[in-house]
Image (cartoon, helix red, strand yellow):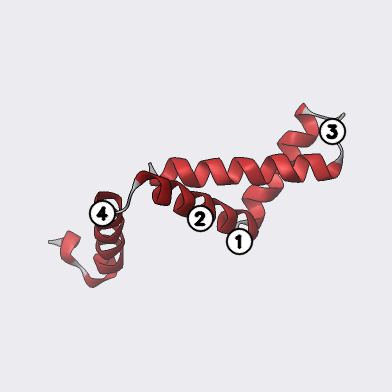
Amino acid sequence: MRAMHPRYWFLYLGIGLAWFLIQVLPYKILMSLGKSLGSLGFYFSKRRRQIGMRNLDVCFPEYSQSEKVQLLKKCFGYMGQGFVE
């Protein structure tokens, strides 16, 4: 019964909480929550932010730095929404 080891309890609790929120909350609120999670991911995931910025540098060299940051923030927001969906 390795699956019942205490180190997995927070994982199960998180999955249960996510399932409960998805069942209870309306779709618009879920999307807002997902967008907020994506914004948090942008600020706390330095490595992923650097990878995304490098990809934008390669793909869109004509964009200014502020346009690339804005596009990357949108992308992280969409990833958060996808996670919630």
Q: Which label was assigned to residue 2?
A: none
Give the labeled residue for mark 4: 24
In the image, residue 59 sits, relative to residue 78, either above or below, namely above
Is disc 1 surrounded by few (<14), some (14 to 19) or many (20+) residues within 10 Å? Answer: few
Give the labeled residue for mark 2: 37
Quadrant of the image for the N terminus?
bottom left
Sequence-wise, the earlier of marks 2 and 1 is 2
**The residue under label 2 is which amino acid type?**
Leu
Quadrant of the image for the C terminus?
top left
Is disc 3 surrounded by few (<14), some (14 to 19) or many (20+) residues within 10 Å? Answer: few
Give the labeled residue for mark 3: 63
Give the labeled residue for mark 1: 44
Q: Report which quarter residue 42 is drawn in.
A: bottom right
Front residue of 5/31: it is 31
* SS label for mark 2: helix
Q: Nearer the viewer, mark 2 or mark 4?
A: 4
